[in-house]
Amino acid sequence: MATTKDSPNLQLDFVEIVSPRLWISTSYKNTYVGNAAPVLALDVSNPLSNWYDCGSIQSARIPVTKEMRELKRGIPKTSRKFWETDRTAQITFNTSDLSPYVEALIMGQTIRNTLSGNACKVGSLMGAPRQSIGLSASPAPGFSEYDVVVCASPTSASLEDSFNLAVVESLSASLLTLEGAGFPIATVDEDTVQKVTRTAFIDRMGTDTIRSAMLFWDDKLDSSGNIKIQHAIYFPKVRNFSGGDLDFKDASEEYETSITLSAQAVEMTFDDGTLGYDFYKKWMLSY
């Protein structure tokens, strides 16, 4: 007989140290509002279309609060009935990654880029289209190390409003190499790239910027590094609830900011076919 002192195991596959990842869209995405869920494992190196990876986050929490009204009757009074009268849900986390697009997304801001020099077209795609880009020779690219550049499709977005920003590592002939992970959104043929001299973060009072969020983490990988079990939480509508609590710490630690995103209830179709309001959809996905 096992006793409580023996602490018998249940399923240790679900006891993990995890590093959650947060993706945010620039606008409301109803991708999973219907009876739908991610078909393939969410890949940190390849975000879904029009989602932006906000980098590593720490101290992530999803506080859900409920307020209940209680009906009591009798002597002594005893509970006879409960009503749920209020419910809220949030995502809270800390991050040290304040890349311009990350800062704007998590703060509920839009951005405006001031451009300089020639806009160059993407002429050829490399094996890593976010980090390395073959530019057309004309007009001649004039980028230097540490230049900030922006990329956009001339048919669907403007360079001035694009969140697709990166820092130049080097330019060799027409081959542009970017720092780190490069552009948050992979380039495609005929995209244009241009130097940015200033990025303004715009957060006018009275405006309301609603975005979607996906928080996920991996539980189990096989021996080849393939994701076998993954948890994901999809928030159809979130908005910045707290501004940003920027903490510069001291000379021995990197700065970080504390963020609270508030979720808005949306009518959704759940996996059992029922329809109702909720703040999010939560899945355990196995592949």
Image: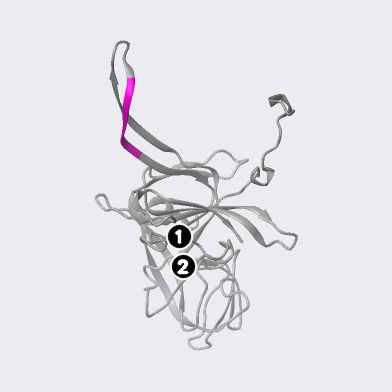
Q: Residue 32 or 245: which is nearer the viewer? A: 32
Asked if residue 242 lies left or right of residue 257, the reply is left
Question: What's the amino acid at mark 1?
Answer: Tyr
Where residue 7 appears, x then y in whole percent? Answer: 70, 30
- Which disc is residue 64 wearing? none
Disc 1: which residue: 101
Disc 2: which residue: 164
Pointer 1 or 2: first along the chain = 1
Cα–Cα span, label 1 and label 2 = 7 Å
- Name above or below for residue 58 compared with residue 155: above
SS class, disc 2: loop
* Residue at the (47%, 56%) spot, across then down: 102
The extreme top residue here reads 75
Q: Are marks 1 and 2 in contact (CB under 8 Å)?
A: yes
Question: What's the amino acid at mark 2?
Answer: Asn
Q: Which residues are magenta?
A: 79-87
SS class, disc 1: helix
Magenta highlight: main SS? strand
Does the magenta segment cover residue 68? no
Q: Callout 2: 10 Å neighbours few (<14), some, many (20+)?
A: many
- Name above or below for residue 193 compared with residue 8: below
Can residue 85 be seen by looking at this rendering?
Answer: yes
